[in-house]
Image (cartoon, rainbow, N blue to C red):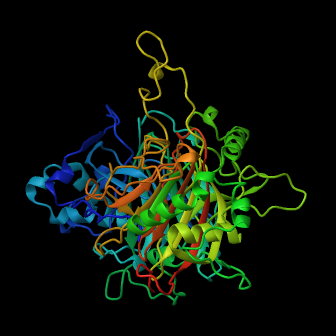
Amino acid sequence: MACTHERSRSPDSNDSASLVKRLKTSHVSPTNGAAASTSSNGAAPTSSADRDPTAQFVQDIFDHNYIASLHTEYVANEPFKYSVVEKLFQDDFELNFTEKETDIYKVNQTGDLASLNYLTSSQISLLPNLLTLRDALYSERFRSFLQAVTGWLPPPNHDDVIGTRRVSYIMYMPLPHYQFWQKDWGGALELYPTKLGDDGQPEPESVPVKSIPPSWNQFIFFEVQPGRVSTLEDGRERLSISGWFHAAQEGEVGYLPEAPVPEVKSSREQLTSTSTIFKPYSDALEPPLPDVPLSEEHIAFLSEFLNPVYLQQRTMKALALRFIEESSLELHSFLTNALAESLEPRLRELDTKDGLGAERAGRIPPHSAGTSGAWTIKGPPHKWRYCTLKPHQEGAPAAAVTPRAANASPAFRAWVAIVSRLLPLKYSTEARRFRPGLDYTLATSEEKEVRLDLVLGLTPNVKEDNSDATRTSKGKIRDASEQLTRGWQAAEWGGWECYMAPHNEEDDPAVYRSGSHKKASNGDAQEAPAPIDDKAGTSPATVEDGGEDEDAEMDQDEMTPGFNRLLLVCRDERVMRFVKYVSAAAEGSRWDICAEYEVGQLQEEGHDDNLTP
């Protein structure tokens, strides 16, 4: 399987340590902090029924005329029912946050609002405003307000059963409160229409039809549907409280029988169900064997693309031994110099042309960016969103990126078989473009089958500049080794390829401990040149060391984006894989050619070290 390590448990809201980071979200004197969100399961404390929360809300929010206008808005809005309260509460809030990182973003988060019932009195004393906010949101007065707007009454107490969620809500607190939030800062609530996917399940479209920018003390609630609601953020501070209100069940006040609805797969089931469409290799060709050298014909074909070092028999044998031991390889300078030198400037030009280059200065681009010509958006966004290269049309101009080398060619299939000791049976390949501020893939896995993943990274390196960061005190340009690492190499822009060990059932599979080590790129990796013939000169081959002892507590393996680097990974069943959301701060797109193989194990007679099924 892929080189992974056991995941650490998710932070416990009952731990005192989880209450350490405090952030004043006051509209009088806000302090700096990372974007944050909280989650609630809708349970309310018994004490809320004994308090009148009216004074906590803005004046006239319970006015019947205002409620009637919200109801009209709620029923009429598309793509599904929602309503916006521009200002909800009167008071400032002092909230406590702990850091949380997921397969898309990093946030600072409070504990579950319902978990406040289980905290000690000393812990509760640290959270007075969070408790007040929770009691107001789940009070009888506010639930009656929701009933008047939506047409149904949420029960005062309810377990967080996903199937009973009826209304989601988000309360926004962007900082600083007095600054008007601009659209290209991101952070908006995006509403996506749904369609039926190939499996008959409803799924969101790739592009939203409604985007609601956040404002201070704004409260948005919307009907829960099998669609997708997403937020996008750059480095600005956009705090929020989010949660759900549930429908009453039989025996509870407000219960209304509902017509049966078609069974819909859970989010977990959708993420683990494979959607890769594989193509088989021709049955007319004999399958390659690991100990059979590449033929002269294969070498001639691959020499057009691959660095000749990786076509030497001794090099391939050394790589195979390492792959058997580590289940992964990272090979630098994989393509020929001529091909690499022609690709990099063309990819930079495409980003500049499409408004996705450094000139964007961190602004969130429109969803249409980079989709003209040969590229199109691939969704659905509850699983992934990125651009893929359309099939080449005869007579159309050639694209800068093409997955020709990692396709059905017998030559490349033979090379993969030799270095992996696995037999590719079927393949799927695509060129991918992850745009800054827009694209990502969520953590997905195969529940029962092994996959062989191949990713050829083509993300251009960060351009060197003559800024103060690269100069000495006397104004001279620093050596490359002295310059500050930034961008992709510093893991500042996301976009890294991540493999995560199977999760425990009580943990959220999409969450991993923040601050984890990111594998270095572009020369910062630990180098181990593969053995080659002395006549061939110095090898540019770089093979990643697993570093198992050093990183024993890591919960995932990650590789930052780089140019002209090949990642080959044997992904065992239930190992989760994703590409981290690419930050809007990135100075260009993350590019790669990605291939996935169904594989079988090779077995030959008369060899003691054969792999068996």
Q: Nearer the viewer, residue 121 or 324?
A: 324
Q: Quadrant of residue 209?
A: bottom right
Residue at the farthest right position: 395
Which picture quadrant has residue 286? bottom right
Q: Nearer the viewer, residue 203 or 245?
A: 203
Q: Is residue 438 above or below residue 292?
A: above
- Tell me residue 12's x, y (percent): 21, 61
**How far across and how far down the image is residue 321, in percent?**
43, 65
117 up-or-down from 219: above or below:
below
The quadrant in which the N terminus is found is: bottom left
Quick one: which residue is furthest to the top in this view? 474
Closest to the observer, 157 or 525 = 525
Residue 555 vs residue 179, the one in the foreground: 555
Q: Residue 561 in the image: state x and y as whole percent.
A: 52, 48
Using the rendered image of the protein, determine whether residue 184 is visible from the camera's viewpoint. Answer: yes
Name the outermost residue toward the front: 535
Is 91 placed left or right of 406 in the picture? left
| In the rendered image, the vertical position of residue 447 relative to residue 100, given as above or below | below
Q: Position of residue 428 (x, y in %)?
A: 64, 71
31 with respect to 237 (left or right): left
Quarter of the rendering occupied by the C terminus = bottom left
Residue 208 at least partly seen: no
In the rendered view, does 451 fall on the left or right side of 388?
left
Quadrant for residue 296, please give it: bottom right
